Image (spheres, grey):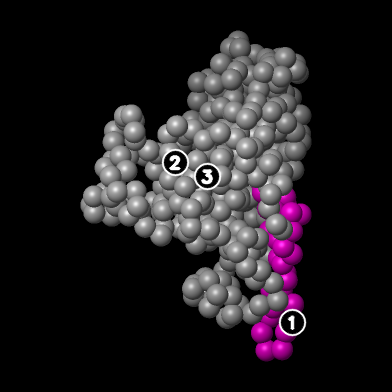
């Protein structure tokens, strides 16, 4: 990555002091300390904390980056500027909208509390569905289905469409996306191409930086008739994690359903939404996709989606349980 302190100094016309801060790194939860290096410095006479991914060639997904920034601010308690090696065009828009300060040396700077300076380098711009951009929701579901429910390898696109209940066009688009990200290939097989896609921990590890939390929002609700939550409802969060690992369940039960389902459940009287939690209430996670589609049992959400929903937890007990969760996978 280009020297970002020189880039800011040249841009702002003022020195940017920044020195490594191992003490602050040690205060961070393990998953943040492993992911970012911390530098303390000054920016336009203002004390500023700069955080730099330890693997700039494998940047976090944008949704993860937003959660990481919020967690870093809580832990470090001051201005936190993300220093990134690359950022796709849609990522620039998301971070600006969420007012997350960032620097991409040679390309863009956004410092809402100091100045605003955005500059695009046409030669370096990254747009569209690039190799490092997050997977679409459908592509993520495809990958997690293959890893957990049923192998899709050596199947034609027509056969895969029938297995998933999707259109052939939707399957074709997903496979093209996964090919672009080098997560699968196609092989000639008579009149149709066959999908070549490993089913292993190695594939999960390669895909992990491109995967996002399935949780779109969380709501408090009184479970009036939990037995009628329906086939689409599943235990999630710490409730589900306690089923698969040695961690204790939280007193507040957590369930997951598709984000479009909550209104129907409330209309039918199965749940009552609450503006804030009261004793006996549960948490309903509204997911971007149907939890039941990937679940391998009738009780909890699937392991890999559960991992993604909790991987940014600052609780070290949860992080330890997530390691145990993956160890229990049958790849």
Q: Is residue 261 left or right of residue 316?
A: left
Q: Residue at x 28, y 44 (%)?
A: 224
**Residue 134 visible in the snapshot:** no
**Residue 112 visible in the snapshot:** yes
Residue segment shown in magenta: 180-209
Element type where label 2 sits in the image: strand
Gap between marks 3 and 1 measured at Cα: 41 Å
Q: Considering only vertical position in the picture, is 41 above or below 228?
A: above
Gap between marks 2 and 1 measured at Cα: 45 Å
Gap between marks 3 and 2 measured at Cα: 8 Å
* Figure quadrant of the C terminus: bottom right
Q: Residues within 10 Å of mark 3 (few under 14, many from 20)?
A: many
Residue 188 marker = 1
Residue 240 marker = 3
Asked whether residue 181 is drawn in magenta, I would say: yes
Q: Residue at x 76, y 54 (%)?
A: 202
Q: Given contact means CB atoms under 8 Å apart, are the residues at marks 3 and 2 in contact?
A: yes
Q: Residue at x 60, y 58 (%)?
A: 144
């Amino acid at each position: 990555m280009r020297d970002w302190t020189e880039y800011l100094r040249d841009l702002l016309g003022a020195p940017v002091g920044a020195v490594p801060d191992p003490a602050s790194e040690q205060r961070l939860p393990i998953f943040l300390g492993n992911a970012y290096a911390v530098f303390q410095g000054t920016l336009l006479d203002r004390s500023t904390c700069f955080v730099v991914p330890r693997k700039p060639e494998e940047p976090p997904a944008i949704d993860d980056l937003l959660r990481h920034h919020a967690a870093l601010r809580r832990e470090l308690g001051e201005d936190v500027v993300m220093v990134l090696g690359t950022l796709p065009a849609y990522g620039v828009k998301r971070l600006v909208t969420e007012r997350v300060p960032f620097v991409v040396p040679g390309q863009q700077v956004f410092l809402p509390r100091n100045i605003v300076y955005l500059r695009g380098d046409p030669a370096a711009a990254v747009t569209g569905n690039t190799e490092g951009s997050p997977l679409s929701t459908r592509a993520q579901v495809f990958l997690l289905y293959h890893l957990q429910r049923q192998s899709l390898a050596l199947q034609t696109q027509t056969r895969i469409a029938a297995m998933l209940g999707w259109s052939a066009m939707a399957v074709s688009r997903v496979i093209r996306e996964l090919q672009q990200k080098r997560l699968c290939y196609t092989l000639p097989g008579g009149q149709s191409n066959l999908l070549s896609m490993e089913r292993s921990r190695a594939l999960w590890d390669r895909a992990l930086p491109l995967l996002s939390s399935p949780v779109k929002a969380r709501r408090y609700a009184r479970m009036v008739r939990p037995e009628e939550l329906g086939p689409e409802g599943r235990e999630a969060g710490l409730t589900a994690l306690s089923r698969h690992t040695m961690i204790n369940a939280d007193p507040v039960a957590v369930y997951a359903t598709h984000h479009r389902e909550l209104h129907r459940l409330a209309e039918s009287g199965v749940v009552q939404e609450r503006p804030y939690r009261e004793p006996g209430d549960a948490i309903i996670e509204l997911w971007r996709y149907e939890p039941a589609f990937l679940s391998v049992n009738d009780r909890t959400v699937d392991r890999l989606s559960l991992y993604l929903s909790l991987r940014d937890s600052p609780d070290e007990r949860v992080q330890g349980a997530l390691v145990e969760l993956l160890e229990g996978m049958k790849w």
